[in-house]
Image: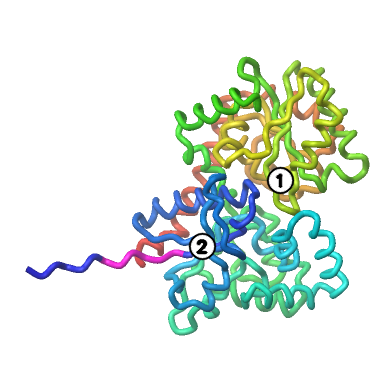
Amino acid sequence: MQQTPSPRRPRIAVVGAFDRYNYGDVLFTAVTRAMVDDVAPGAEMRFYGLRAVDLTALGGVRTDPLRRLFHDPAHRPDAVILAGGDVLTVRWPAMVEHLVPHWAGRIVRGVLRRMGPRAANALCRRLMGVPSVTPWGVDPRDIDPDRPPLVFYNAVGAAGVGRYDAADQAWLRDALGRATWLSVRDARSRDALAAIGVTPPPEAIPDSAVIMDRLLSAEDRAACQTRLAQRGDIPADRPFICVQAGKGFVHKENGVERLAAALREVHARTGLDVVSFTIGRAVGHSDQFACAELQARLGAEPWFRVATEALTVDETMALIAASACYMGTSLHGYVTAFAHDVPRVGMHPGVVKLAAFSRDWDMEGMAAGLTFEQTPAAAAAALATDPAARAARREKTVGTYLDAARRGLAPLAGL
């Protein structure tokens, strides 16, 4: 009796900065897996960064080099998903700089800046073996001109595309015009793409990480929180505020001293302990340096502690979910608090993407884009918000994302 051959599983390439440990980027792998399983169960997924790395021990994935997607027929996909993050703003030099050790980052940055932006972008693109003008933009014809894959942009950031020169803007307009689904994570990104001539303007939807409370069961979250308490990373018996800051935001204008003073005031106002922790350790984030400097200034205080640097994605999620309030410069730290109904404060006026999420998708009473001096009052206000109102805002925003993503990714089911 002749057996009917099993149908071929659709092959989906998930593309992003998954080859370095930054919480938000690594988190997108789990979010994308969940959404693909929702609309196209059984699909085969492979993850692509700029290099081959295995971050499974930290909750990430094994990545293939992005160049294989364009040059190796064995990696030819049916669809490509740009998983999220500021993928249309970032340029090649920044991504290459993030691949080198911290000590070499300044040297590489200096060399590339002397070359000028266009020459540096072209050199880094050639070094990585990828034809795209931007690291995380894909023209499907570059992968297979005869049978181009479907391309999906899942709530990506694009607010900085106005800095591209005219030629690169033209490439981007052309590539995005061939996308099956183009969605961006805030109104700023939508308007920026419209301003360079992307028509019709993309759909603005919430950042995909708003669904992360579905990624970790209550039992697994509780187990992570127990481990964190046993290690001394979080208090076991009293509420706490968690705080995170990127190195670049505290190394300017006496930022460490100002943040330390703000945390003293937060403790004085609330009576809560403060836990400093690390979300991004890759070059360009370097939270561990900010943690160390806060430890040097506040380590003698009985209400202050620093969590271990080696938190996995699940442990980071669990730490924020266990806190009474999140304060930080990380968009996805803020979104994690949002997804778990935790009061939240977005620090630093320079983190415009965080302020954009707060403005477009969060409730009143949750402030972002604040100076360090403004954060004690903001933390007190956030802690005073109504839990039912926080939950209602989350449900509305998550519903907006899920409705759009299920519709936008629906063509995957037909592959």
- Viewer-proximal residue among 12 and 185: 12
Classify mark 2: helix, strand or loop.
Answer: strand
- Viewer-proximal residue among 92 and 194: 92
Q: At x 86% / y 65%, what residue is drawn? A: 110
At label 1, counting other C-alpha atoms closer than 10 Å, the crowd grade (few under 14, some 14-19, many 20 or more) is many
Q: Is residue 117 magenta?
A: no
Q: At x 56% / y 43%, what residue is drawn? A: 210
At label 2, counting other C-alpha atoms closer than 10 Å, the crowd grade (few under 14, some 14-19, many 20 or more) is many
Classify mark 1: helix, strand or loop.
Answer: helix
* Residue at mark 1: 354
Q: Kindly report the distance in space between the C-alpha atoms of the residues bearing marks 2 and 1.
A: 23 Å
Q: Residue furthest bottom?
A: 146
Q: Is residue 105 left or right of residue 61?
A: right
- Residue type marked 2: Ile
Residue 22 locus on image (x, y percent): 65, 49
* Residue at mark 2: 81
Q: Is residue 217 left or right of residue 259?
A: left
Q: Tell us which disc is closer to us: 2 or 1.
A: 2
Q: Quadrant of the C terminus?
A: bottom left
Q: Quadrant of the N terminus?
A: bottom left
Q: Quarter of the image holding residue 324?
A: top right
Q: Is residue 1 visible?
A: yes
Residue 160 locus on image (x, y percent): 74, 62
